[in-house]
Image: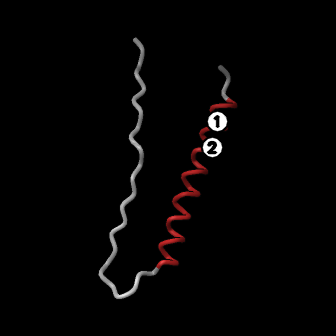
């Protein structure tokens, strides 16, 4: 028997904010940058591990 690999759906991020007078755009930018960098790091590590594995 062969196992089928199901493609994961694309990750979607939703940000819900509190009702405040001003938005903290600096904090939001830092969070978004951290998410993108973590996602790129994970993809890079996955690519490196698939390249180094024999077969």
> Does 14 sit above or below residue 22?
above
Within-10-Å neighbours for mark 1: few <14, some 14–19, many 20+: few
The residue positioned 39% from the left and 57% from the top of the image is 13
Estimate the x, y position of residue 9 in percent, counting from the top left.
38, 41
Q: How many marks?
A: 2
Label 2: state its secondary structure.
Answer: helix
Q: Distance between the Cα atoms at labels 1 and 2?
A: 6 Å
Asked which quadrant contains residue 46, the reply is top right
From the top left corner, tell me how far across and down residue 31 is, in percent: 50, 68
Residue at 34% over, 74% down: 17
Query: Which quadrant of the figure contains the N terminus?
Result: top left
- Give residue 49's mark: 1
Determine whether 27 is above or below 37 in the image. below
**Residue 43, image x, y percentages:** 58, 44
Q: 3 or 36: which is nearer to us?
A: 36
Tell me whether the residue at label 1 lies in contact with that at label 2, contact meaning CB atoms closer than 8 angstroms. Answer: yes
- The residue positioned 41% from the left and 44% from the top of the image is 10
Residue 35 lies, in percent from the top left, at: 51, 60
- Please state if 4 lies on the left or on the right of 26 as rendered: left
Q: Could you say which is closer to the camera, residue 10 or residue 54?
A: 10
The residue that label 2 is drawn on is 45
Q: Residue at x 50, y 76 (%)?
A: 27
Secondary-structure class at tag 1: helix
User: What's the colour scheme?
Assistant: secondary structure
Numbered mark located on residue 5 in the image: none
Q: Residue furthest left?
A: 19
The residue carrying pointer 2 sits among few (fewer than 14), some (14 to 19) or many (20 or more) residues within 10 Å by Cα, namely few
Name above or below for residue 41 compared with residue 3.
below
Residue in front for this viewpoint, 23 or 30: 23
Identify the residue at the far bottom of this view.
Answer: 21
22 left or right of 45? left
């Amino acid at each position: 028997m062969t196992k089928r690999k199901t493609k994961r759906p694309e990750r979607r991020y939703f940000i819900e904010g509190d009702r405040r007078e001003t938005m903290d755009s600096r904090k939001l930018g830092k969070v978004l940058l951290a998410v993108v960098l973590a996602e790129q790091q994970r993809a890079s590590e996955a690519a490196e591990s698939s390249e180094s594995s024999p077969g």
